Image (tube, rainbow, N blue to C red):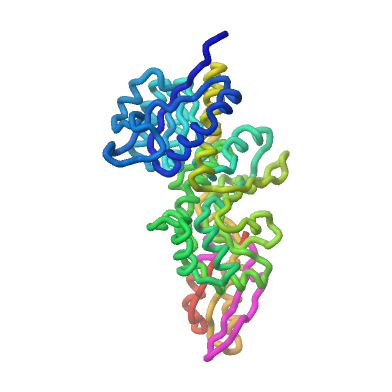
Amino acid sequence: MDKQKVIRAALLGYGTVGSGVYALESRLKDEIVKKTGAALEIKKILVRSLGKKREGADPSLFTDRWEDILNDPEIGIVIELMGGIEPARTYVTEALKAGKNVVTANKDLLAEHGGELLDLAVEHGCDLLFEAAVAGAVPIVRALKQSLAGAEITEVSGIVNGTTNYILTKMSEVGMDYGEALELAMKKGYAEADPTADVEGYDAGRKIAIMASIAFNSRVTFSQVYTEGITKITARDIRYARDFGYVIKLLGIAKKEEDGIEVRVHPVLIPEDHPLASVRSSFNAVFIRGDACDEAMFMGRGAGKMPTASAVMGDVLDVMGNMVHSCCGRVGCTCYKNLPVKKEEDAVSRYFLRVQVSDRPGALANIAGVLGNNNVSIAQVYQKRSENGVAELVIITDRVKERDFNDSLTVVKGISVMKEISSVIRVY
């Protein structure tokens, strides 16, 4: 009988996800052999400091020297779970150059440097897999790269940040204001002590850059993604949206159009009957539209220790299967096009506009006139309340270029009847 093949791996980082991956490796030892044809052994775990006490793993596995992993010829897979750009970029680069396969959950790194790293992987015949970088346990990367490769994808839109979805769910279903919902998210562990990356849309922006690159076969970096967060959304906006038959969600939106790629993150009003509208709490979901595949949606846990660890482990098993059959590097970078990324001012949307105006005859006519003179047509308008001589108007526009809409707002702010522009939210 042939001796059982053993594939050895190293973990870079032993935080929440790293400890989850180690726990899964221990739990699934027999399953891994049956699924890949080889046993998996985690030989080294890179940490910043050896002095910190860590539970769940043999202390002899820990090292604070990257060279112990890089220079070990037995280690064939590097599992990067450190996060951030550096030193992760250096470690992944050196691992690939040394012929080691890499699995990563690092969205920051891939959103900025994914192209160069994937090219490097191909050059050295290595796998670089990153399912966990986009939406945790939701298998969207492999779906876009492989399962849907036979379709021309025209849109990828998603709720890819559980923190903001949890906050908006509480604002919508319980009537909380933003601050109260954020505080609850922190208590529940859905929001970090510094939630900026989540609530300002940066986290979702990195993920939609990665998905757009794969879906449209053309490189999109995070710096090209327009981002806007949820900090200005109010409980009143959510109530009014519901009156019109909409739900407010923070979406990452990527669309391929004749003149280029449109890619952005911002709050939107989604029709209540859209599949994404029903995605609650901290769940993630990605909606896809394409010519041959029509419409599809993938939904699940987008973060958390074990959901993310399961996605990482799925990639590890994929790499192991490729190593057993000597076919690593078979799915490399798919960005063989060079499509332009449109500027946000050229994007086209409908808008929800909530304003406070003087409660006197002709106020609405004044506003409508200014909007019309700047190519902005009104689809719906309602006066929601009036008190102390001030009326609140809610306007939903027809589709309009961002540039024209912003020009119209500049003029609207200056007319005598205008007291305040309270909210501006795009409509899906």
Q: Where 350 falls versus 253 (above or below)?
A: below
**Where residue 192 sits in the image (x, y, percent)?**
41, 55
What's the magenta region? 378-407
Q: Where 121 falls versus 251 (above or below)?
A: above
* Magenta segment includes 214: no
Q: Residue at x 68, y 36 (%)?
A: 151
**Where residue 275 sits in the image (x, y, percent)?**
68, 54
Q: Residue at x 47, y 46 (%)?
A: 206
Q: Residue at x 59, y 57 (%)?
A: 348
Write down the quadrant of residue 152 in the picture.
top right
Q: Is residue 301 visible?
A: yes
**Where residue 142 sits in the image (x, y, percent)?**
59, 35
Give the dominant element type of the magenta stretch: helix, strand or loop: strand
Q: Is residue 335 visible?
A: no
Q: Quadrant of the C terminus?
A: bottom right
Q: Nearer the viewer, residue 90 or 131?
A: 131
Q: Residue furthest left?
A: 51
Total marks in image: 0
Q: Residue at x 54, y 28 (%)?
A: 317
Q: Nearer the viewer, residue 58 or 276?
A: 58
**Where residue 120 sits in the image (x, y, percent)?**
44, 26
Q: Residue furthest top?
A: 1
* Position of residue 102 in the picture relative to residue 351 (left or right): left
Write down the quadrant of residue 102 in the picture.
top left
Q: Quadrant of the N terminus?
A: top right
Q: Nearer the viewer, residue 348 or 102?
A: 102
